[in-house]
Amino acid sequence: MQDLHEGCIVVTMDQKHLTPAMVRILQVYLEDPTKPLYATELMAAAHVGSGSLYPALMRMEAAGWIVQEKEDIDPREEGRPARRYFRMTPHGAREAHADLVELSESVRPPAASPAWNPKWQPNWRILKPLRTALRFFVPAPKGI
């Protein structure tokens, strides 16, 4: 899907495009959407690797959720290359927040779920036939 945003055509995202890594990245950004973050800082805060981070950043940039800014330093003086900072746009902050709320609602367990009852226990009647069927392959665990 595409829509017009601030004079540019951007690819829009929806809930199905939110990977677990992207959710963690967005959570970090939404703590302070105005704070620019560089990749290493973002990987540490979101607990994601570069193999998950960069594809997520590319999708978010294509959707207009973030913009890149190169650090204005003299690499010789600093003794390191200039960093690329990624900053969330106001549009991105609104869309990310809405998509995370929608995702949260879609994965919420139903209120009538038996697991909400503190006295509920899973039905373990399946273990005896399963143990019988697997007794030649796996020794039976003690105490079950």
Image (cartoon, grey):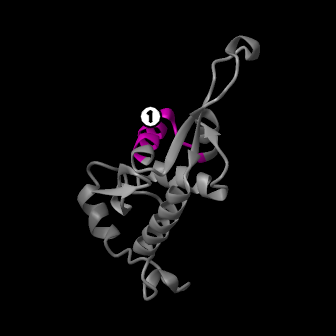
Residue 111: percent from the left, percent from the top?
46, 86
* Residue at x 62%, y 27% (from the top left corner): 83
Residue 12: percent from the left, percent from the top?
35, 56
Q: Nearer the viewer, residue 40 or 59?
A: 59
* Residue annotated with mark 1: 51
Taking the image as drawn, is residue 44 in sight? no
For the stretch drawn in magenta, the main secondary structure is helix
Q: Nearer the viewer, residue 111 or 57?
A: 57
* Residue at x 47%, y 42% (from the top left corner): 57
Give yes or no for residue 51 being in the magenta stretch: yes
* Residue at x 49%, y 83% (from the top left corner): 120
Relative side of 80 to 4, left or right: right
Magenta highlight range: 46-59
Taking the image as drawn, is residue 124 in sight? yes
The quadrant in which the N terminus is found is: bottom left
Q: Amino acid at mark 1?
A: Gly
Q: Secondary structure at mark 1?
A: helix
Give yes or no for residue 112 being in the magenta stretch: no
